[in-house]
Image (cartoon, grey):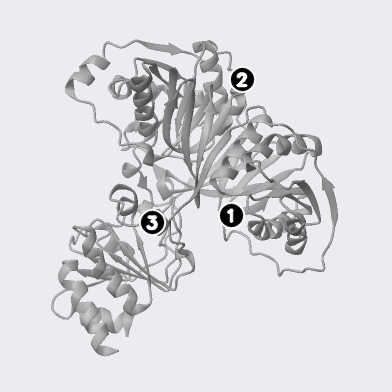
Amino acid sequence: MGIFQTVFVYADKTEMLAELCAGGKQLGSQVCALVLGPKEEVDKAFSYGADSVYHLGELKDRRIEDYTETIIHLVQKEKPELILIRSSKRAKLIAGRLAAELKTSVLTDVMEFTVDNNELHTKRLVYGGAGLKREYSTSEVVVATVGGGVFEALIEDNSRKGNIVEVDFVQPAHPVRCIEIRKKESESVNLSAAKCVVGVGRGFAKQEDLTLAKDLANLIGAEVGCSRPIAEGENWLPKERYIGVSGAMVKPDVYVAIGISGQIQHMVGANSAKTIVAINKDKAAPIFKQADYGIVGDLYTVLPALIEKIKVSK
Amino acid sequence: MKIITCYKIVPEEQDIVVKDDRTLSFDRAEWKIGQYDLNAVEAGMKLAEATGGSASALSIGGKELENSKLKKGILSRGPKELFIIADDYLREADTFQTASALAAAIKKMGSFDLILCGEGSSDLYAQQVGPQLGQLLGVTTLNAVSKIIPEGNKLVVERTLEDEVEVLEVTLPAVISVTTDINLPRIPGMKDILAAGKKPVTQWCLADIGTENIDCPTRSISTLAPDQTERKQIILEGEEAVQKLYDAVFK
């Protein structure tokens, strides 16, 4: 590949630059990282493979978004052909504001980049996972946000150095005052890395019953995930455990879907599982067409029996 | 407080059919109001009610916007008036084209204090129109807002990010995209639906807002159903089902 001359990479957490630097190297000849933070962060960017660093400053008591104008100014001046931005809420706001100034759109949540006929083609999920949209941008500066796992980070090399350019801060036009920052009390769970996942859905009648799924998960060394309504409508489980198009994309050896009907929005997040097991009392549930093994039955009888069977056999 | 809520008309994704060549058929899909935009409409109504302000609704898109059921659908959720720019040229609009048309329409509508958007459209979900619109209008711009409290001529908002919640003071005017957690959208009653039919609807064409020639920088190549992994589809029933499942997967 490598059809671009200069690729800018930016992430609102420096450790997330590693994959982007690797991606930048695949797509272009010069990777320039935009780094906000102390000197160590600049060194990190070089160790990830950046050829040069634009050092935006040290953040201190400012908000990350206060640097949006600084980034816009830098991009307008340097005109890279491609900017890869790691997907996050903050980054999407910065990307959108930057794109508007460049009179272009953002290719969001890109899952795959390919070069075809000297054009950079991207793929992303649309219609709640029912479609995979292939598109490209005709813009002079292409702006794309990228999720985790799209590129594979290079091996870190701390001996790497490069040119550092100090970037002047541009005052934000509309500063927003931060009154307070609260750390979220969510447990950190990495569903995407789990070897085994038990997914729970609307088939569970009440929150307490989820202990059944948790018991099974403990027995087989699985993480518990869920469908969107369990995390967002019922709030029975934290959002971090929701599997699906705008949630976690899991790729375990075994995915056990319990009381999950199998709507595309959910299944697109589980489609990479090696083996899918479905337990559902509705014989017509679409999940059975997307499972390797299905038990048609009431989860309240099937789960205890399965738990017992595994316990006895251990 | 003068509030404008933007929304998008989208196809009902449950009714999209995958054809044999993996292309998608929308023949059976009805148009509906974007699911996440309903939270923005509700947030606008709550604020208008709390501040004695007014809430209007605005949408750009294809000719489907003219559908009277959809117009009533949005107005029955509270906004006092509706503005639409319906042109099939905009049906496949990308986020920049959409934000540009909205910005032009908002300028023609006159002054505003607050523009609300949903966190993303429920069809393409790029989550970009709000951020771009704010920048084009040159005002304070925020996304991921999960709570809004009016305080004098300012707002105190909570912004829910991946691992933290920011509490921010926002001066108006502003463009804010709200999350689905912000509220539970109201379900309009028969009275609301009847009243909606009497509310004013203003329809403009692209020439009215001076945006006949906005370019669409994103070119679509194809939209196909994702590859499905082949599954065994072995259905186990009866007394031995659990034993068989155990033998096949958990042994």
Locate the N terminus of chain B by quadrant: top left
Disc 3 from disc 2: Cα separation: 42 Å
The amino acid type found where label 3 is placed reads Tyr
- Measured as percent of width and height from the top left, residue A218 is found at 33, 76
Q: CA distance from mark 1 to mark 3?
A: 23 Å
Q: Which residue is mark 3?
A: A242
Residue sitting farthest toward the bottom: A313
Compared to residue A147, the image places residue A142 above or below, namely above
- Identity of the residue drawn at 42% across and 30% down: B149
Q: Residues within 10 Å of mark 3 (few under 14, many from 20)?
A: many
Relative vertical location of residue B244 with respect to residue B121 in this rendering, above or below: below
Q: Is residue B172 visible?
A: yes
Callout 2, which amino acid?
Asn
Q: Secondary structure at mark 3?
A: loop
User: At numbered mark 2, what does the secondary structure look like: helix, strand or loop?
Assistant: loop
**Of the image marks 1 and 3, the number of the one nearer the N terminus:** 1
| Residue found at the far left of this picture | B239
Q: Do the residues marked 1 and 3 share a common chain? A: yes
Number of residues whose C-alpha sits closer than 10 Å to that of mark 1, classed few (under 14), some (14–19) or many (20 or more)? some
- Indicate the position of residue A92 as horizontal and vertical percent values: 57, 42
Marked residue chain, label 2: B
The one of B115 and A100 positioned closer to us in this rendering: B115
Say yes or no: labels 3 and 2 on the same chain.
no
Q: Which residue is mark 2?
A: B213
Image quarter where the C terminus of chain B lies is bottom left
Query: Which residue is labeled 1 in the image?
Result: A112
Residue A285 placement (x, y as % from top left): 23, 58
The foreground one among B241 and A167 is A167
- The chain containing the residue under callout 3 comes to A
Vertical comparison of B245 with A61: above or below: below
State how far apart marks 2 and 1 are (Cα).
31 Å
